[in-house]
């Protein structure tokens, strides 16, 4: 069972909860789509209508080599294209788990930190998918 703070942020809901399910789905999708998943994943609500998944140690070996060469921009660019190509799979998974329609989605990569953020904005309120 999840608890909500005064500002609408959802507290950790345990291993079988919505946030854990979203984190597990992000790991699974990254493994399926990119050949390797993050070693650490956690998801949090940021207010009532936004969900952020933080995925650590996410980069592929070739991407890590690019970072070592100082080519962080190439990693960010390729990740942007990967995410655009697989957007619907990520959105669909989150909509199914959360039970709300995603109206906006964005992904960001920090190559130096080997971290990816997946950000979902839901239709306002409690509108179901």
Image (cartoon, rainbow, N blue to C red):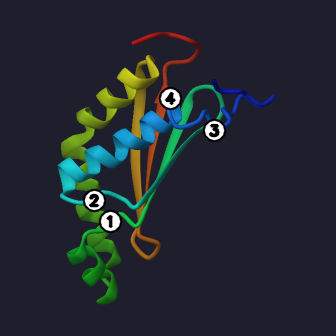
Quarter in which the N terminus is drawn: top right
Which is closer to the viewer, label 2 or label 3? 3
Pinpoint residue 56: horizontal percent, then vertical percent.
45, 62
Numbered tag placed on residue 79 in the rendering: 2
Mark 4 element type: helix
What x and y, as percent, mark residue 113? 47, 72
User: Which is closer to the viewer, label 2 or label 4?
Assistant: 4
Q: If you read the primary sequence from the N terminus, does the residue marked by circle 2 or circle 4 appear first?
A: 4
Sequence-wise first label, 3 or 4: 3
Q: CA distance from mark 3 to mark 1?
A: 30 Å
> Can you say which quadrant of the picture contains the C terminus?
top left
Task: Provide the residue designation for mark 4.
Answer: 18
Contact between marks 2 and 1 (CB within 8 A): the answer is yes
Q: On residue 76, which mark appears? A: 1
Answer few, some or many: residues within 10 Å of disc 3's Cα (few below 14, many 20 plus, some between 14 and 19): some
**Closer to us: mark 3 or mark 1?**
3
Q: Is residue 127 left or right of residue 7?
A: left
Q: Mark 4, mark 1: which one is toward the viewer?
A: 4
The earlier-in-sequence mark between 4 and 1 is 4
């Amino acid at each position: 069972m999840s608890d909500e703070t005064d500002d609408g942020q959802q507290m950790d809901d345990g291993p079988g909860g919505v946030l854990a399910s979203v984190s597990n789905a992000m790991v699974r999708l990254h493994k399926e789509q990119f050949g390797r998943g993050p070693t650490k994943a956690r998801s949090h609500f940021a207010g009532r209508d936004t969900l952020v998944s933080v995925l650590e140690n996410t980069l592929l070996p070739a991407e890590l080599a690019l970072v070592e060469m100082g080519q962080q921009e190439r990693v960010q660019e390729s990740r942007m294209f990967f995410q655009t190509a697989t957007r619907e799979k990520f959105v669909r998974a989150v909509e199914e788990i959360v039970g709300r329609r995603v109206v906006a989605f964005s992904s960001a990569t920090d190559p130096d930190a080997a971290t990816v953020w997946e950000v979902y904005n839901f239709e306002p309120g409690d509108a179901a998918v």
